[in-house]
Amino acid sequence: MSERPAGLRAVRDVPAEDQAPERLEDLMVRVAKGDNAAYEAVFTRVSGPVYGLIRRVLRDPAQSEEVSQEVLVTVWRNASRFDENQGSAMAWIMTMAHRRAVDRVRSEQAATERVRKLAPRTYEPAYDDVSESVEIRLEKEAVRRCLGSLTELQRESVGLAYYGGYTYREVGELLDVPLGTVKTRMRDGLIRLRDCLGVTA
């Protein structure tokens, strides 16, 4: 990124109480260098707008909070990619937030579609029997309904492990979450599925 204008450096000579708040763009330069204090300042300024934008897209508060955290972590990790010549820091962050929110919606739709496509393989009728077909359809609807009660990460983890054939470690890598988190979410998700479907242990 280009060097800061001399005028901005001169501001540091002014007493702290007389200084204007540091520009978000300058804070991002410091974040890119690993400055924790600068990141805290960025977090304070953008976390509200980021959550608000994501909430308007996802509507669900829990998912909105989760995606907001992902975006804010990405800001920390990818601060060096910010280029002020391409636009403001706020625009960069909000664009990232919007993309993540849309990705989550698409991911959720894709997960539901995968379950819908794969469910018939799981419940193939042994006979061409109307009553059995109705029972299978009801079971598929129950599975779809119960999958909908899971969190996005639980649903994605279960889908990748049981329908995609991935290991827990591979699921963690695909979703960019720690292995321990995948195991916990899988366990909680399967318990919730079992309870929702009324399956006794």
Image (spheres, rainbow, N blue to C red):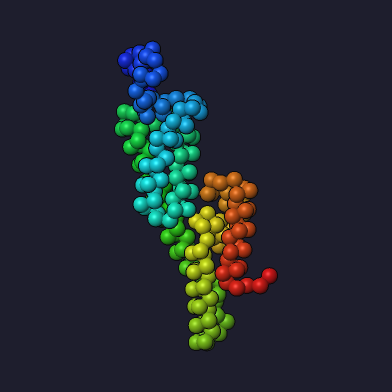
Question: Image quadrant of residue 49?
Answer: top left
Q: Which residue is the extreme one toward the front? A: 17
Which residue is found at the position 66% from the left and 72% from the top? 200
Residue 174 visible in rendering: yes
Residue 32 visible in rendering: no
Q: Residue 82 at x, y = what percent? A: 39, 31
Which residue is found at the position 41% from the left and 29% from the top? 28
Q: Residue 30 at x, y = what percent? A: 44, 25
Q: Which residue is the extreme one toward the right? A: 201
Picture quarter with the C terminus: bottom right
Left or right, 42 with reference to 169:
left
Left or right, 200 with reference to 175:
right
Which residue is found at the position 45% from the left and 64% from the top? 113
Q: Residue 107 at x, y = what percent? A: 44, 55
Vertical order, 78 against 183 (above or below) = above
Front residue of this view, candidates 149 and 14? 14
Vertical order, 155 against 138 (above or below) = above
Front residue of this view, candidates 4 and 167? 4
Give the number of callouts.
Answer: 0
Vertical order, 134 against 88 (above or below) = below
Picture quarter with the N terminus: top left
Left or right, 88 with reference to 155:
left
Q: Residue 158 at x, y = what percent? A: 56, 59
Question: Image quadrant of residue 88?
Answer: top left
Which residue is found at the position 53% from the left and 76% from the top? 139
